Image (cartoon, rainbow, N blue to C red):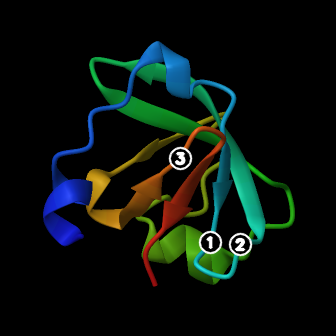
Amino acid sequence: MDAMASETVFTDDDEGKRVVNPNGDDIGRVIEVRHGVAYVDPDPGITDTLKSKLGWGDSDEESYRLDNENVETVTDDTVRLKR
């Protein structure tokens, strides 16, 4: 499954998908895809620990790059992150 995630290329069809943690909890939404990379608008309640794990820091950016190494699976309506 890791190989699949490392080869994930996001498309415009992925815009609007929910981004969930491994437990299925919403952490944000894909708001833009540029050059195969998804950018996420995080839920205001997302913890600083999770932001740090995803390399998003604690800046007040509007959207954050979602690196493929953090993606477990992509379905028709969600992007599920790895543990």
Under tag 2, what secondary structure? loop
Position of residue 11 relative to residue 10, above or below, is above
Position of residue 7 relative to residue 50, above or below, is above
Residue corresponding to mark 3: 75
* 5 lies left or right of 53: left
> How far, Cα to Cα, is label 2 from label 3?
13 Å
- Identify the amino acid type marked 3: Thr
Say which mark, if any, is on residue 21: 1
The residue depicted at 52 percent of the width and 19 percent of the height is 13
* 18 lies left or right of 37: right
Residue corresponding to mark 2: 24
The residue depicted at 46 percent of the width and 84 percent of the height is 83
Quarter holding the N terminus is bottom left
Say which mark, if any, is on residue 70: none
Circle nearer the viewer, 1 or 3:
3
Under tag 3, what secondary structure? loop
Looking at the picture, how far across and down is residue 7, in whole percent? Answer: 16, 46
- Identify the amino acid type marked 2: Gly
- Identify the amino acid type marked 1: Asn
Q: Pointers 1 and 2 in contact (CB under 8 A)?
A: yes
